[in-house]
Amino acid sequence: MYRKLLFELGREGRKGHILPRCDVPEKPIGEVIPVQHLRENPADLPQVAENEVVRHYTALSTMNHHVDKSFYPLGSCTMKYNPKINEKLAGIPAFSQLHPDQNLSQVQGALQILYELQEYLKSITGMDAVTLQPAAGSQGELVGLLLMQRYHKAKRENRSIILIPDSAHGTNPASAAISGYKIETLKSNNRGVVDLNDLKAKISRDVAGLMLTNPNTLGIFDHQVKEIKDILESVDALFYMDGANMNALFGIVRPGDMGFDVMHLNLHKSFSTPHGGGGPGSGPVAVNKKLMDYLPRPTVKFDGNKYYFDDMDDQSIGRVHSFFGNFSLLLRAYIYIRMVGAYGFSKISEHAIVNANYLYEKLKNRYRLGFESRTMHEFVLSAEKQKEKGGKAMDIAKRLLDFGIHPPTVYFPIIVKEAMMIEPTETESKEMLDYFADAMIQIDDEINEDAEKLHQAPYTTPVRRLDEVAAARNLNINYFYSNK
Ligand SMILES: *Cc1c(COP(=O)(O)O)cnc(C)c1O
């Protein structure tokens, strides 16, 4: 399906407004704007009426899948519905028109929000201090690793190894490599959790820390946190929790109480700020007392009377974001926390876990389970049986699009063959879960009848099956260029 671009829709002189006639003497433009700032040729912008613009973007917004349109069970990504009140409040000019360099006395309200958000995140995680600066979960990981480096350096130790289980999120080894560490992979046992014998074999005073995604990418909660912590403590190694899966833990258990030293949160996952499409994210890092002094500065402080920024400290790893992080996302997360409240937060995880386990039960007879263990807020199916009959995980994913559903994460985690990682989140109704399960079962029936049909899917989307490799290798997003 081809839609005309705004440039093609435009007609010379068409516009979306009428201004009153000028009733003051007109000045030459060069007197209003300094000549050196004037452009030589007018910008080549499409000339369109307001209704054309609105219809154009409304139509575009329905061509892609998004969470306002339908179910989005993309494992690991927590694509929960984002309440519109977040957007409404974040859009009010008192927030959206603030300048980050404004005098602190004029922005006390904004600082109060940052301060209280730090406090809420401390109490949600059970940690002692928080930085709001990191702009993504993965940047949070990098911050955590730099904090670890500082910690060991302060003890005049040079440690070179980070231990990472094979069930960790892929950003963990990437962040460890970027911060200069050597990575040693820990095996999972047959229950899908860390193999403690492998950990015991690999622990040494060369280990700076261990990064545990918990629940891990199989959706399994590693119940051995205490044992792992004891092993790490015996060599003074630090314990990092990848907290992107906090949607499974709210109100049930706190990382600080479990003995983690440092963790990140993904506000754009568990705290309902929008994500996807590479837009801004927010990955605050929370630490215990061991690492507090090394946090990025500034953080927001309160002296009982006014809010202010603390100064850069020699021990701090420094700034990791301009100004204070992505303020508008921090604001949305703050609104969400205030709206949901402490009781609501425990319900988030309960419902997320029940929803995932409901689907697990409905699908386990048709699809092989990645691991037998009970899961938390997400679970992994394997399409191995289906592949033998000619329908791979990718074919199933593409066919789901015809049902108006975003596919699960596929081929990840890599320790499960033909993996399909399903995370329904807490915001979906039983009817929607049933619709998804029925679609998955119908697709399995289709594979039994005529697997070839799946190879052509999707049939009903604006574009059919894309060559994803070519699209990434020969990136061409320039209309004028591609038109030549
Ligand atoms: C999403 C995710 C990350 C990375 O977070 P980004 O904000 O995408 O950088 C890390 N770990 C886990 C478990 C995740 O789900």
Image (cartoon, rainbow, N blue to C red):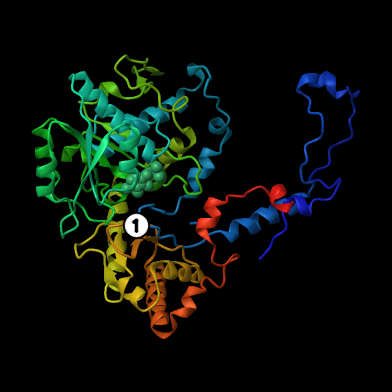
For the point 72% across and 51% down, the residue is 53
Dot 1: within a 10 Å radius of its alpha carbon, few (fewer than 14), some, or many (20 or more) residues? many
| Residue 7 position (above or below residue 254) | below
Nearest the eye: 367 or 298: 367
Please name the residue that numbered disc 1 is placed on.
Answer: 412
* Residue 232 in sight: yes
Q: Is residue 61 left or right of residue 181?
A: right
Indicate the position of residue 23 as horizontal and vertical percent values: 90, 28
The location of residue 462, given as percent across then percent down, is 60, 65
Quarter-wise, where is residue 292 in the image? top left
Q: Would you place residue 410 above or below residue 457 in this image?
A: above
Give 339 or 32, whichever is nearer the viewer. Answer: 32
Kindly tell me whether mark 1's CB lies below 8 Å from ligand 1: no
Residue under the image location 66 percent in, 53 percent down: 57
Q: Position of residue 389 (x, y in %)?
A: 36, 79
Q: Amino acid under label 1?
A: Phe
- The answer to whether 243 appears left or right of 435 in the picture is left
The secondary element bearing badge 1 is classed as loop
| Residue 284 in sight in this render | no
